[in-house]
Image (cartoon, rainbow, N blue to C red):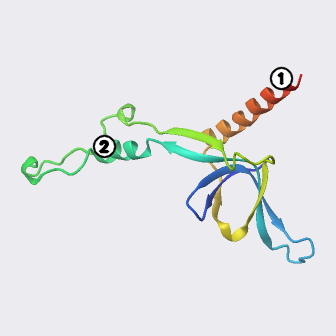
Amino acid sequence: MSVKIARLRNGEDVIADIKEVSAKDDPSKTAVAFQFNEPYSVILEDSEEMEMAMWGEGLIDDEEIEGDDETELLPENEEEAKQPTLILYPWCPLSRNREFFLRIDEVVTVYDPHTQVADQYTQLLKDKQNVSESSST
């Protein structure tokens, strides 16, 4: 399985088992599409709040700044910085099939996710498989 994240032209991030597809009769094997298996939309919740925690709460009035003192924008320790929550939800949830083909020009970039993100996706697929097997018995 090749777990990747694709940034689509509409700005959406999708994690899936992604493969390039080329035309059978093309001797150069130029990719014409991507095949997405088990795609999930990737959302980072509270990313705006996280950015504010990293860069300060907002603009500072000129009156609040005294002399050459610098205003501390970053928290003193990393525990104070709010961590975003990763949310994965089915991409095209109304589809019966979980395999999709996207034209190559609909995808801006494809990249390897952080290990924790790939692990969470893989665990999600395992859990989904376990639920499917237990409900069929």
Disc 1 is placed on an element classified as helix
Q: Is residue 11 left or right of residue 33?
A: left
Residue matched to label 1: 134
Q: Whole-percent x and y of residue 39?
A: 71, 48
Q: Whole-percent x and y of residue 27?
A: 90, 77
Q: Whole-percent x and y of residue 36?
A: 75, 54
Q: Pick the residue in front: 120 or 104.
A: 104
Q: Is residue 12 above or below residue 85?
A: below
Please state which of the two labelled residues, at mark 1 or mark 2, is closer to the viewer.
1
Q: Is residue 19 left or right of residue 73?
A: right
Identify which amino acid the numbered label 2 is placed on. Leu
The local crowd at label 2, few if under 14, some if 14 to 19, many if 20 or more residues have their Cα within 10 Å, is: some
Q: Pick the residue in front: 67 or 34.
A: 34
Disc 2 is placed on an element classified as loop
Q: Is residue 10 above or below residue 18?
A: below
Give me the residue at 66% from left, 42% from top: 118
Q: Is residue 26 above or below residue 9?
A: below
The local crowd at label 1, few if under 14, some if 14 to 19, many if 20 or more residues have their Cα within 10 Å, is: few
Give me the residue at 23% from left, 44% from top: 72
Give me the residue at 60% from left, 53% from top: 13
Say the numbered circle drawn on residue 74: 2
Residue that lies at the very extreme toward the right in this rendered image: 25
Give me the residue at 83% from left, 23% from top: 134
Identify which amino acid the numbered label 1 is placed on. Ser
Please report whichever mark, 1 or 2, sits nearer to the chain's N-terminal start: 2
Q: Mark 1 and mark 2 in contact? Answer it, CB < 8 Å.
A: no
C-alpha separation, residue under disc 1 versus residue under disc 2: 48 Å
